[in-house]
Amino acid sequence: MGRSGERWTYTASGPVTNVAARLCTLAQEGAIVLSEVTASLLTDTYVVQPLGAYHLKNIPSPIEVYRLLGERRTVTT
């Protein structure tokens, strides 16, 4: 029998979560910024704009950052 009122808390952590948190600080209002890994997975469907390499807090190496512009079929480059 389970106890009522028991609460579980889960926390995401690790390098991917850390990079995601740091990328959020780079995004201007309404923008979506991506790491190189994520951008490479989306380029067939979405248009991404390279923003350059950034040194992010608690990340040992610079990260190539991209901005998502929109769906490939609706955005002209």
Image (tube, rainbow, N blue to C red):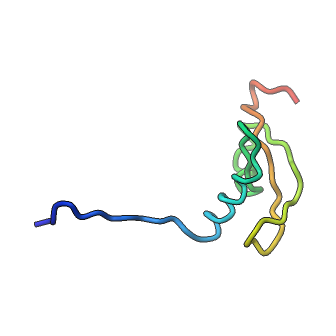
Residue sitting at x 72%, y 55%: 23
Note whether 30 is above or below 76 in the view shown.
below
The quadrant holding residue 19 is: bottom right
Tell me residue 6's x, y (percent): 23, 64
Position of residue 21 in the picture relative to residue 60 (left or right): left
Tell me residue 2's x, y (percent): 15, 65
The quadrant holding residue 53 is: bottom right
Residue sitting at x 88%, y 30%: 77
Which residue occupies the extreme bottom position in the image?
60
Note whether 39 is above or below 3 in the view shown.
above
Position of residue 18 in the picture relative to residue 52 (left or right): left
Tell me residue 36's x, y (percent): 77, 56
Residue sitting at x 10%, y 66%: 1
The quadrant holding residue 60 is: bottom right
Seen from the viewer's position, the closer of residues 74 and 15 is: 15
Total label count?
A: 0
Tell me residue 69's x, y (percent): 78, 35
Seen from the viewer's position, the closer of residues 55 and 36 is: 55
Residue sitting at x 75%, y 26%: 73
Note whether 44 is above or below 38 in the view shown.
above
